Amino acid sequence: MLLAAGAGALWAAYILLSHRLGSRTSDGTGLALAMVIAAAVAVPFGAVDAGAALLTPTVLVAGLAVALMSSVIPYSLELEALRKIPPRVFGVLMSMEPAVAALAGLALLGEALAPVQWVAICLVVAASVGVTRVR
């Protein structure tokens, strides 16, 4: 329970800090700086594990593609959304990510969901609809 509470607190901090960053910048400089810091933290661990293999062209191109698709594009879209909607609404809408992932798993991988999981997805979607309708 402590780990779940910690994760929730860090998630809230991420949303509030992203909202502040989005409201203070209109271009991608804040996000670019965050990505450079994240790379500076992560790359040494990869370098220790993989060494010079990280510098091959195929690995560099694959790394760039992963960075764009998993971080730069989604975070850019999140910052733009936070410029337009309140953080509380954004936080609830972000709770739909597991529901979307479950539906993608069902559609793309044929993973079955239990009835209680379908109910949970419907409740999350209903909460998201409700919070976007209430001012």
Image (cartoon, helix red, strand yellow):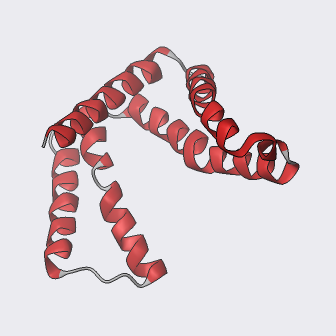
Q: Is residue 18 visible?
A: yes
| Residue at the spot 45% in from the left edge and 20% down from the top edge | 21
Front-most of residues 5 and 17: 5
Apparent side of residue 82 relative to residue 108 in the rendered image (left or right)? left
Above or below for 92 versus 111: above
**Count of residue discs:** 0
| Residue at the spot 22% in from the left edge and 52% down from the top edge | 128
Above or below for 99 versus 70: below
| Residue at the spot 19% in from the left edge and 43% down from the top edge | 4
Quarter assignment of residue 60: top right
Q: Position of residue 119 (x, y in %)?
A: 14, 72
Above or below for 2 versus 124: above
Quarter assignment of residue 92: top left
Q: Is residue 87 visible?
A: no
Q: Position of residue 65 (x, y in %)?
A: 70, 50
Q: In the image as oriented, which residue stretches furthest toward the right?
A: 57
Apparent side of residue 31 relative to residue 80 in the rendered image (left or right)? right
The quadrant in which the N terminus is found is top left
Q: Position of residue 49 (x, y in %)?
A: 65, 43
Quarter assignment of residue 100: bottom left
Front-most of residues 79 and 68: 68
Q: Position of residue 99 (x, y in %)?
A: 30, 63
Front-most of residues 49 and 127: 49
| Residue at the spot 62% in from the left edge and 20% down from the top edge | 29
Above or below for 127 versus 45: below
